[in-house]
Image: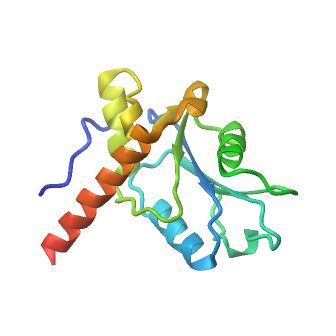
Amino acid sequence: MSVPQPAGHASPLEQPLVSCVLVAPTGPGDLAAAVATYASQTYVARELLVVDDYEEPIGSLLPADPRIRHVRLERPHQPFDKLAIGARLGLGGLVAIWDPDAFYPPWRLEYQVAAMLAEGKRDPRLEMHQRADLASMDLAVQTKAVSIAIATTLAEVERR
């Protein structure tokens, strides 16, 4: 099994900014893992918004990185509402859901953005959402993300 390669490379100045929205996980271990997969991304033009509504704020657990922003909510919200809040506060023209318990390979954002730019349109199977389409997320989007994660995990196991 081979790792997919992006369809083309834009210089960092030409890359659209991707706002990755992470609904804060329940435990600090999951948070650390999610931030680590974000930090390993090869795509340069990105930001991570960590949306947190827990009793104990988690901002102190985040690394000092100007691309990572902590969004502290004063009261509990439903997960989809937290995603929508993060998407509204993001600066990017594209929004990527950053699931706290999913494995994302380092090339995830680079591959997805390159595929979108190559086709000149949004492909909903890539789990990237233009702001206007955030409310239309469906199971097909999540299924594609899981299939990418499984294929990548299998590739890693085969290499060992």
The image shows residue 54 at horizontal and vertical percentages of: 77, 67
Residue situated furthest top in the rendering = 120
Give the percent coordinates (x, y) of residue 160.
16, 78
9 or 36, which lies in front? 36
Whether residue 11 is visible to the viewer of this picture, yes or no, is no
Q: Is residue 118 visible?
A: yes
The residue at 45%/36% (across/down) is: 15
- Quarter of image, res 60: bottom right
Position of residue 9 in the picture relative to residue 48 (left or right): left
**Residue 20 on image: x %, y %:** 56, 48
Residue 23: image x %, image y %?
64, 56
The structure residue drawn at horizontal position 63% and vertical position 71%, both measured from the top left corner, is: 63
Q: Is residue 134 above or below residue 58?
A: above
Total residue callouts: 0
The residue lying toward the viewer, choosing from 130 and 91, is 130
| 137 sits to left or right of 156 | right
The residue sitting at 43% across, 46% down in the picture is 142
- Residue closest to the eye, 83 or 77: 77
